[in-house]
Amino acid sequence: MEKQTIVIIGGGITGLTAAYYLQKAIREKKLPYDVKLVEASNRLGGKIQTYKQDGFTIERGPDSIIARKKPGVKLVEELGLKDEMVRNGTGQSYILVEGKLHKMPKGAFMGIPKQIGPFLRSGLVSPIGKMRALLDLTKAKGEEKSDQSLGAFMRRRFGNELVENEIEPLLSGIYSGDIDKMSLMATFPNFYQLEQKYGSLIKGLKQTMPKASQTTGKVPGAFFSFPNGLETIVDKLVENIDQESILLNAAVDHVEKKESGYHVLLSDGNVLKASSLIVTTPHKTIPKLFSQYDFMKVFTEVPSTSVANVAMAFDRSAIKQDIDGTGFVVSRNSDYRITACTWTHKKWPATTPDGKALIRCYVGKPNDQEVVDLTDDEITSIVLNDLNKTMNITAEPDFSVITRWHNAMPQYTVGHLERIATIRKEAQHQIPGVFLTGSSFEGVGIPDCIEQGEKAVVDVLSFLQD
């Protein structure tokens, strides 16, 4: 039987996961398929990128994988990396509100209080704001809705003050977005489900969140990475994928539908024939790939935001006012341009040589996108100026590593899931065998992308074997 080819467009974590699980299924079930993974750039891994300098391990993209989402842990175990997993150092984290660092109240989850005592003792919210927030315990659950904004949902449950001082800095930071525009069901559907089931988010979180270890009294770190950095998982995936199936520096110009499948036309003039495709590229590239299909044009209206992160190395002695913790997020009512700061040498001690400090800060609020395009020196100056409002740093950094991610954060605005469902239904009808997936669709986190890559494999095999 002549082999059919499955082409995967995009070599980020979604595409790599799809290639890995697809080739695994082909081997185990002796299926008559070939796989081609095409990536426009000269490297694989997408936003996962580890950089080494002078003994420091610096993440240019995400710094970890959240442990409570199973697809990430499952893949790590399959790749034989379980023994290399390193949990983040747990410690005090802070929220910067109106120029002052406040400790994150003990027991809070995404800014939502699970323990009433620590919340009442916190200085983050005024007494009136606390009374309003605790109405969540008695306030009736909202009416059933297909979607609503995350901000509107949280404000109805807890009032404006807790949302703006504590919840918003954490939730908007994950998506680099505006919570008053973000879709609740596309970002945190679990909050809606907890409200519907328990009538209160506080009660629901108390019932469902992991308890502290009985032996140590501590909740284990919520995230994990690897001693050599997060790119370890990319390297291991690539090692487990047939090298002949990978094409780097292979930008796709467009895709043409043919009687017996598809032609994938590369920018260098080469053509790949495919029986089925998994497309994992950012949504903004898709209308060009499928320019003859009007239903794809909706992707041009899906917004994205840009972010930059700044990693700075110092001698520990240069930080005169050190803070006991792993970092802080910044509320939008503070006069700061950074949105968050991680004291990486405390959160991930193995990243930093003895006697040194590694601090990573982020810029690029939704209403401050121009900061991402400033020069390296300008961004470093802005970051140091903001840091010195809370920390006394007496020296310039030994070096800085600045990474810009332009239009890299897809915004899941209200109605996102319905729009994606409509596009996929049209794709099934007009371009059967083409499966669209990745961070623009059902989750920007690494485990979400891994899960989507794995599901795309199931969809492709089901289509080809139908």
Image: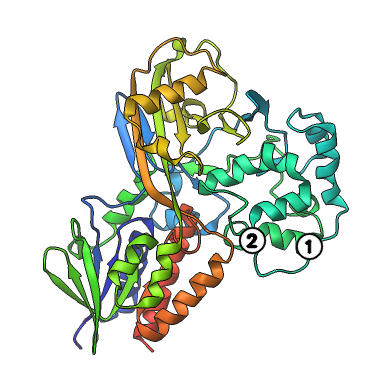
Q: Amino acid at mark 2?
A: Pro
Q: Where does label 2 land, which residue?
A: 189
State whether residue 207 is above or below residue 26: above
> Residue 142's mark?
1
Viewer-proximal residue among 102 and 4: 102
Residue 372 place in picture, x, y as percent: 39, 37
Viewer-proximal residue among 202 and 230: 202
Report the number of discs.
2
Q: Quadrant of residue 60?
A: top left
Q: Residues within 10 Å of mark 1 (few under 14, many from 20)?
A: some
Q: Quadrant of residue 261?
A: bottom left
**What is the spatial separation of the Cα atoms under label 1 and label 2, in whole angstroms?**
14 Å
Give the residue drawn at x 58%, y 39%: 221
Give the mark nearer the N terminus: 1 vs 2: 1
State whether residue 198 is above or below residue 372: below
Q: Residues within 10 Å of mark 2 (few under 14, many from 20)?
A: few
Q: Amino acid at mark 1?
A: Gly
**SS at mark 1 in the image:** loop
Residue 228 place in picture, x, y as percent: 36, 37
State whether residue 62 is above or below residue 324: below
**SS at mark 2 in the image:** helix
Of tags 1 and 2, the one toward the viewer is 1
Q: Does residue 112 appear anywhere in the picture? A: no
Which quarter of the image is occupied by the N terminus?
bottom left
State whether residue 316 is above or below residue 200: above
Give the residue drawn at x 43%, y 43%: 62
Give the residue drawn at x 41%, y 38%: 370
Residue 457 place in picture, x, y as percent: 39, 72
